[in-house]
Image (cartoon, grey):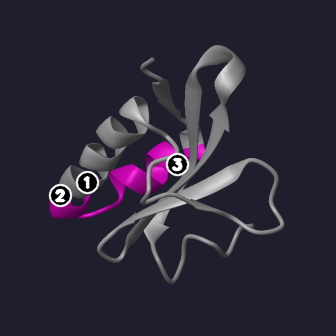
Amino acid sequence: MRYRVEITRRAAKQFDSLPPDAQRQINKLFDLLAENPRSHKTIKMHGLDNLYRMRTGNWRVVYEIRDNVLLVLVVAVGHRRDVYQSF
C-alpha cells in the first residue's frame, strides 16, 4: 500500500524557504514516507497524538498518519533547532 503525502500550507512555506540541498534531502524523505510512514527511522513524538518525526541530517519532518485514507500529512519542516517550537 502506498500512502499519499500532502503538505500543509505552513509546512510548504517552511519547505520553500530551505536551501536547495535540504529540499532535495527532504524530498527523498517524502518518497520514503509514501512507501512506509512507520519505518525504522520514524520516531513517535511524545505527548502529541498521532504525530511522528523523521530526520535527515539537521532537518526534520513532522507529520501525521491517517491510516483510514492512506494519507501522510506533513505539518512542519525545518532545522532541528526550530521545527519543534510550535508544538
Amino acid residing under circle 3: Ala
Q: Residue at x 16, y 61 (%)?
A: 21
Which of the labelled discs sits on residue 20, or is there none?
2
Q: Nearer the viewer, residue 40 or 17?
A: 40
Q: Which residue is mark 1?
A: 23
- Image coords of residue 47 (percent x, y): 83, 67
Query: Is 17 a magenta residue?
Result: yes
Residue at the limit of the structure toward the bottom, as seen here: 81
Q: Which residue is mark 3?
A: 11
Q: Are the residues flagged by discs 2 and 1 in contact, CB closer than 8 Å?
A: yes
Q: In this image, 17 relative to 28: left or right?
A: right
User: Is label 3 in a helix, a strand or a loop?
Assistant: helix
Residue at the limit of the structure toward the front, as seen here: 40
User: Is label 2 in a helix, a strand or a loop?
Assistant: helix
Q: Which residues are magenta?
A: 10-22
Q: Residue at x 35, y 77 (%)?
A: 58
Q: In this image, 65 relative to 56: left or right?
A: right
Quadrant into which the C terminus falls: bottom right
